[in-house]
Image (cartoon, grey):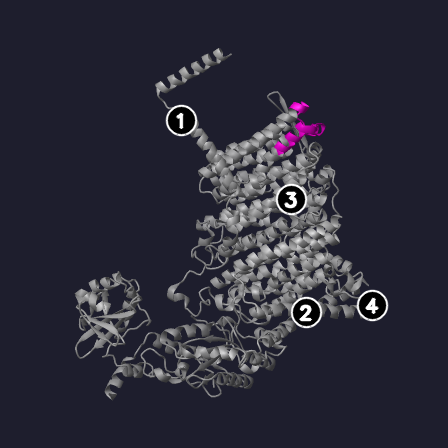
Amino acid sequence: MDMIGMAIKIAILIAYAIIGTCVGLLFMGIGRKIIARVHNRVGPPFYQNFIDVAKLLSKKTNISHGWIFDLALLFSISGILLTLLFLPIGGAQLLSMDGDAFLVLYLLAIPALGFALGAGASGNPNAGVGVMRALVMMLSYELPFVITLIALMIYYDTTSLATIVKMQSIDGIKSWAITMPPFMIAAFAADMALQGMLMEQPFDIPVAPHEIASGPMVEFGGKYLGSLMLYKAIALVAETTLFVDLFLGGGVVMHSGVMAAIINFFVWLGLIFLLFVLSILIAASFPRFRIEQAFGFYWKYEAIIAAISLIWVYIMVIK
Amino acid sequence: MKSIELLGKGEEMHGRAYIKLNVNELEEAIKKLKENGFNHFVMLSCIDWLDKGKFELVYHMWNYEEKEHAMLSIDIDRNNAVMKSMSHIFPQIETYEREVHEMYGIKFEGNTRLTPFLLENWPHDPPMRKDFDSKKFVRQMYESIPFIEGEENEGI
Amino acid sequence: MGLHNGDKMMRYEEWSKLARKASKKSLWMVHFCTGCGAVEMPPVMTSRYDAERFGITSMATPRQADVLLITGYLTVKTLRRVIQVYEQMQSPKYVIAFGSCTINGGMYWDSYNTIKHLEKYIPVDLYIAGCMPRPEGIINAFIKLMKLIDEGKARGWEKYQKYYDRYKENQRRVFNFEIKEEQKEEKNEEH
Amino acid sequence: MLDIIFAELIVAAIITFFVREKLAAIIAFFMSLLPLLALLDWASNYGFAIINLGIESHMKIYLAGVTLHLAITPLSWFFALMILPLFPVIMLFSYSFFKENDGFFALMLLSLLATFGILLSRDMLSLFLFWEMMSWSSFLLVYRSKDRNAIMSYLIFSVFAAFAILFGIIILWHENSSLLLSDILNISGKPGFIAIASLITGFAVKAVIMPLHAWAPFVYSKCDESFVAFLAGGLSKLGYYGMFLFLFSLKGVDILQSYMTNVSWNYLLAVFGALSAFFATLIAILQDDLRKLLAYSSIGQLGYIAIGFGIGTPLAITGALFQAFNHAFFKAILFLTAGIVAYRTGKWKISELGGLAYKMPFTFMAALFAIFALAAIPITSGFAAKWLIYEAAIQQKYVFIAPIMLIAGVGAFLYSFRILYGVFLGENRHDNVEEAPKSMIAALFILVMPLMIFVVFPGYMLDLMKPALQAAGMESIAHTKFAIETSLAKYNSIAVLITLMVAMIPAFIIYKARKHRVTSFEDNYLAGEPYELHKPSMHAANNFYKPLKKVVLPYLEPGATHYFEKIYNGIKCASNAVRRVYTGYVQDYAIYVVLFLLFIVGWLIWI
């Protein structure tokens, strides 16, 4: 019996990994389409990114710079899948009982660090500069993000994402964190941080293609670039899901039953799609920040906004 | 024209000052013009007078206040094409001298950077000299390189 | 550089049809902007002609790209960089040469430093004639290239591997501006 | 048995002073294993029966009319377990590190003796004696660096720490007229407060908490790396041992709190720890000297232990002890790696290094593992430690400290990558560099072992510290072999690791599905420029975090070191002024005598 339960669980995990990948690629394609419409273009078909990945993975020559370079491929996909599975997705707990938000934050660093290792191993100066920018950007957006995270944690008195989702779904949409005024402010700050996390337009200087030749991935091609595209697709799903879990109750609107699970799943899908579209629309209409400007933006304005929400929540909790 | 007044010779040519100088007067002339508002060195050009056996070097300078273009022209012997470098007056002259050296084979004494500039590995005569037959060179050089024909059903 | 020593020849037929379909629908190009052709690229990519609807995007580095687009005349010095870029691309890779300068030298046919026939040095899959070709021509060329890929005819990269020594010999000669002795005499007599 | 260990350490120290360096290293290696043997034997006291030699667990030394009480306690056993293994490893490392024997091994053995003594001492006098012995033996080791800044700063701060500790001890003795540690519980009120506060200040110097850290960057960056590995890994933990001993085992917290109730002394310590973690991390990011970077990173990582002690709940203390254990090992690895790099290339500036990973793969792997632990990546034991501290901060609702701590954790990624990229990846600039000697590699991998064991079994680490916590009257937190559970959440190491393994499968399939070709470093995209033509410098390591530097540096400029320099300059000026009095002329001295007499006469008349 235990074996069967285990097998079912593994099957569910695999299913979610595949769903995450497909959804990510699909969203990226739709994102390209949306940007094209904003530019008054026709744009590529929505399934374009599947074709791109298939092409990259079927390239005949793949050029590596040694075994450390290969770590980028191995760690980026495995690390991001790991992160995805530790998040509650649309009410499905997956592995989220075995870890918490801090674990997810640090798990997100595994693929990033693997990627950075590979980029560094190529020896291209553009890659070094790109990774430096990505890391400084990470330092920038993590500050408002962790402040909002802590606000949520002390309010719900837990660090477990599963518990946060559970407590937000007690009363359906009415108990989502974003319905409370302090968390509205926090959600704004966190959404801006999400923009940096997704490396979308105002904050895409780490991969600036015309300036540092797409930065860290300058030497990546073929299966290496394909794996990085997959990583980006899954990361998109994982990061938006993290936001949904924190502020939008993980997309849970109904309890118990197969029907509820299906509805929750689609609500989750809709919510991460909305978040992604929001970020794409911001991306399509803003030019790029320099790294100092982005740092200043996050550490001055965003951090203050996040801190206001944290203090508000702290006062609420103390009372 | 100010430059003609300053140097005491030369003529106006299409709204520019054309001043013919001896080789040994040039350095003084450039310095004098530089002190008197001609602070932009535009370029150094070279003309190959094959029949006269001379290279004409023209130093173009520009005065922003007067909006005046001065051309200081000197002649040097074609068979002994050596000239003193002027790069100590305007540093950018160094680059123009490199180009002229490469294209005409004129040696500039005092310029330490007369390395290949636009052409890599050029083994022949300087290409801009009038006695360099460009068409013949193209025939000998480029057209002699064979096409690479693939077998049937290969390539396009 | 010996870049292609490790690559064994592989028949194109062994490729699955799916891979070919995928690579035809997602042509990423690195445009080597020499000469005047570069100015034709922005209209191709932006709202007016929108090449992205065919899956054509421009990439920043040759490692990521499939198509090398050479937009205009090449001097010997630039050719060296073009070959470096071409060798850094990962096969299957295609070359589209752009404008009459790449075909026969164009208006620089008698220049001492402009190469006349690009295909003597790297395999060219497709030429676009014109001086300069219009954006429609470029998009047309891409569609033609897609067709060639689909039919398995765009195999310049295989040709480059197969006749690597001969290409290298040509490249070496042009880099060193080497005129063979017998050539010199022969041509002189002709005169 | 115990006295034999002490005796053999002294004898070994004397012998190693006179023999050749290789022999000295071998002797020192085997001699330093003996205290470890004693530790393993004592393990049976705490429920881990490994070997049984019957080494007595307490001893008294009669020395010039005083009795020194030595005994093992659960706390000292745990701290010994993290500090003492460093010694044989360092000896092993130093086997081929030194070209001649200039007293390193003898002094290290003396340090070992002193460390062992500090951990065992059960009365104030022996604690102070061994502390001084450790200070002086380590001072002589610092003295070998021949760097004035390092020697002076270490001397001044050590003397300051010793005075602070002595002051505390004297007050306790005066109040209590007993030197036994267990009698401290009797005192309270103002004297108790002053005594505990000054003791903690003294230990904080060795524990490099931020305002008292100024000596560390100088010393860490100028001494032999094999010694610094002990200094950063081991010696700093002795400071935290002292803090734990007085604050928690001997209930110093209550003494502090009972005197001044309106100030939360715990919170103050946590704030200092958080500031250490934050500012040291930011400074570390901007360093170019590898050893200085590691020094500041050390201060930052030790800050987490201070935060843990400051929060003071069993959860936080568990995390702090876990972090202390990890830090001892990974920082030792990193300093030893810096030693290897310097040994092979003779350089410390990161901007001059680069590309060593393919030349010395084993060193790189060890360093990579240490860096993963430092950055708390969840595939090393570093994560569990920091996670526990984070949990504790959230549990206690420390809203000021928690974000600072988390952002310092992110900052650790930045300097980790600086080390990885600047030293090991990127352009290779050293053609004739070989892999490090086998003894050094062995030393590194011995140190990697615990980091790998405790990532799979974080529960075992909690078992190890359980006796120490229980002795301090704290409950051990709920855990199994693999999982740790707090009131807020649960961390299951095996779930992470197994899922990572499984998630590796698709990555591996993609990796294996298509062949790849390994190309040389020269074949790199440089906007089409062939590398051989100009051979440009490809290492983007100079002034690496320039954008960050531009933003952050104005806020970091007036650092603590600046104020210490001001104090130092002030004292120098004052001393100069005093020195002017001694002009060296007889007339001046005569005038002083006359003035003094006039003053006396005037005073008498005035009366």
- The answer for which chain carries disc 3 is D
Which badge, 1 or 3, comes first in the chain's sequence?
A: 3
User: Which mark, residue C7?
Assistant: none
Asked if the residues shown at circle 4 and circle 1 are in contact, with their CB atoms under 8 angstroms apart, the answer is no
Labels 4 and 3 share a subunit? no
User: Which mark, residue D307?
Assistant: 3
Labels 1 and 3 share a subunit? yes
For the residues labelled 1 and 3, the Cα–Cα distance comes to 47 Å
Count neighbours of disc 1 (C-alpha within 10 A) and say few if under 14, some if 14 to 19, many if 20 or more.
few
Count neighbours of disc 4 (C-alpha within 10 A) and say few if under 14, some if 14 to 19, many if 20 or more.
few
Residue A224 position (above or below residue A292):
below
Asked if the residues shown at circle 2 and circle 1 are in contact, with their CB atoms under 8 angstroms apart, the answer is no
For the residues labelled 2 and 1, the Cα–Cα distance comes to 78 Å
Assign the magenta stretch its main secondary structure.
helix
For the residues labelled 2 and 3, the Cα–Cα distance comes to 40 Å
Q: Amino acid at mark 4?
A: Gly
Q: Secondary structure at mark 1?
A: helix
Q: Locate residue D146, reporting x and y percent.
A: 44, 38
Q: Quadrant of residue B61?
A: bottom left
